[in-house]
Image (cartoon, helix red, strand yellow):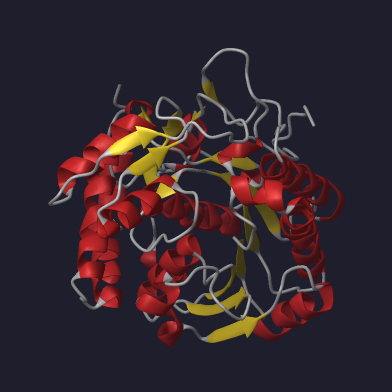
């Protein structure tokens, strides 16, 4: 699947200095798929704090136990919760018709690389056909003005030399998860050209981000959740590839990008394309570096060893070039990696102490945005 797709270009996107605009989201009808997941729960709380009329579409139960959705009582602020599998086209179409949303953010997915090896058909069915079903439902829902389809930084074909991927790079994927995200990019671009090219049609964009960290992530086979499980149990962490470089970022940074992008799409069709939302260049770090920083922040530290059992292959180096989002959307990461790790440890320590996690999570959102977004967007790139 070595193809480069940035989408149907109507005109060059407008240059903006578009930090998050709370007034845009107040009373805005928003439909969010995957709202019970880790990133979805954070975004749900943020949209609730902004005063949106939020409909969530997810499976009946959160994907992990425990879950941020339940611990932070995210359901209390939803206008509506629709138990719906995105693989079920008719049920998804009915959910959109009932919600009558103006903005749709699609985050429902099978999100784990390693699980995709165990369940490839499920991965493709959810990530590819689930996206097809949503876009077909949007075609019949005339209230929709802006659509953000969240994919992944794993959608890019591996490059021969380590470098940051830009939106113009070829798409690919050497495992079921990564290739399913590349396929979602391709099909979204095809729908944009085939069905959403009229200036009055819904504006459709994709957002690429990955290696997101933050409080409330309890997924299996992710670095930070594995670290906190080991810390709580007093166990040694086993690392598959301590020298692998990844574009780590706190969850609020890409989420702010999705919100700013939705605002831009609502204003103009010229932003209907693919966008990267990654950290600053200096925050692309090795697994070992991240483990060391987390260890220093925990009272008893962490010990680790190399897990030399057989594992599926992983890319040794993956980073993103987000200069387009910075230049044309006025977006910038909300936190540095150091700040993001501190916030994540703070959240888990609050969890272990039995604190009110809805209040803790909302306080972290409030402290990082929107004033921080405006401030950081004006800062030059750090090297």
User: Where in the figure is residue 176, as x and y percent of width and height?
Assistant: 72, 43
Relative to residue 15, is residue 257 depicted above or below? below
Q: Nearer the viewer, residue 269 or 318?
A: 318
Report the number of discs: 0
Which residue sits at x=23%, y=38%? Answer: 293
The image quadrant of residue 198 is bottom right
Q: Quadrant of the C terminus?
A: top left
Relative to residue 169, is residue 376 depicted above or below? below
Which residue sits at x=38%, y=26%? Answer: 281
Q: Quadrant of the N terminus?
A: top right
User: Where in the figure is residue 12, as x and y percent of width and height?
Assistant: 63, 35
Left or right, 297 with respect to 96, comes to left
Which residue sits at x=35%, y=34%? Answer: 305
User: Where in the figure is residue 373, as x and y percent of width and height?
Assistant: 31, 49
**Which residue appears farthest toward the left when viewing the image?**
299
Relative to residue 362, is residue 131 depicted above or below? above
Relative to residue 162, is residue 332 depicted above or below? below
Left or right, 379 with respect to 70, comes to left
Left or right, 256 with respect to 179, comes to left
Q: Is residue 293 visible?
A: yes
User: Where in the figure is residue 353, as x and y percent of width and height?
Assistant: 18, 71
């Amino acid at each position: 699947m070595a193809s480069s797709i940035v989408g149907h270009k109507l005109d060059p996107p407008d240059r903006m200095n578009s930090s998050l605009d709370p007034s845009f989201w107040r009373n805005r009808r928003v439909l969010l798929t995957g709202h019970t997941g880790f990133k979805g729960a954070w975004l749900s709380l943020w949209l609730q704090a902004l005063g949106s009329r939020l409909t969530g579409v997810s499976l009946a139960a959160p994907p992990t136990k425990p879950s941020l959705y339940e611990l932070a009582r995210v359901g209390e602020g939803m206008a509506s919760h629709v138990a719906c599998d995105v693989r079920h086209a008719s049920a998804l179409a009915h959910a959109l018709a009932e919600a009558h949303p103006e903005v749709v953010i699609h985050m429902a997915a099978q999100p784990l690389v390693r699980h995709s090896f165990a369940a490839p058909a499920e991965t493709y069915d959810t990530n590819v056909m689930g996206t097809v079903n949503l876009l077909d439902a949007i075609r019949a829902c005339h209230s929709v003005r802006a659509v953000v389809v969240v994919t992944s930084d794993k959608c890019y074909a591996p490059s021969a030399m380590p470098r940051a991927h830009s939106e113009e790079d070829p798409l690919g994927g050497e495992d079921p998860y990564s290739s399913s995200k590349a396929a979602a990019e391709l099909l979204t671009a095809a729908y944009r050209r085939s069905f959403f090219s009229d200036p009055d049609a819904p504006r459709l964009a994709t957002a690429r981000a990955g290696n997101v960290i933050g409080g409330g992530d309890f997924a299996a086979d992710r670095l930070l959740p594995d670290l906190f499980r080991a810390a709580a149990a007093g166990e040694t962490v086993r690392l598959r590839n301590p020298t692998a470089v990844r574009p780590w970022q706190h969850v609020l940074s890409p989420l702010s990008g999705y919100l700013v992008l939705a605002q831009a799409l609502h204003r103009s069709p010229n932003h209907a394309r693919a966008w990267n939302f990654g950290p600053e260049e200096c925050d692309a770090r090795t697994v070992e570096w991240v483990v060391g920083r987390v260890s220093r922040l925990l009272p008893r530290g962490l010990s680790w060893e190399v897990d030399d059992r057989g594992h599926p292959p992983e890319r040794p180096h993956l980073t993103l070039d987000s200069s387009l989002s910075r230049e044309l959307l006025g977006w910038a990461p909300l936190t540095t990696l150091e700040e993001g790790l501190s916030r994540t440890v703070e959240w888990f320590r609050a969890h272990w102490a039995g604190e009110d996690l809805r209040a803790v999570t909302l306080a972290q959102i409030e402290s990082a945005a929107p004033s921080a977004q405006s401030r950081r967007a004006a800062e030059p790139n750090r090297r």
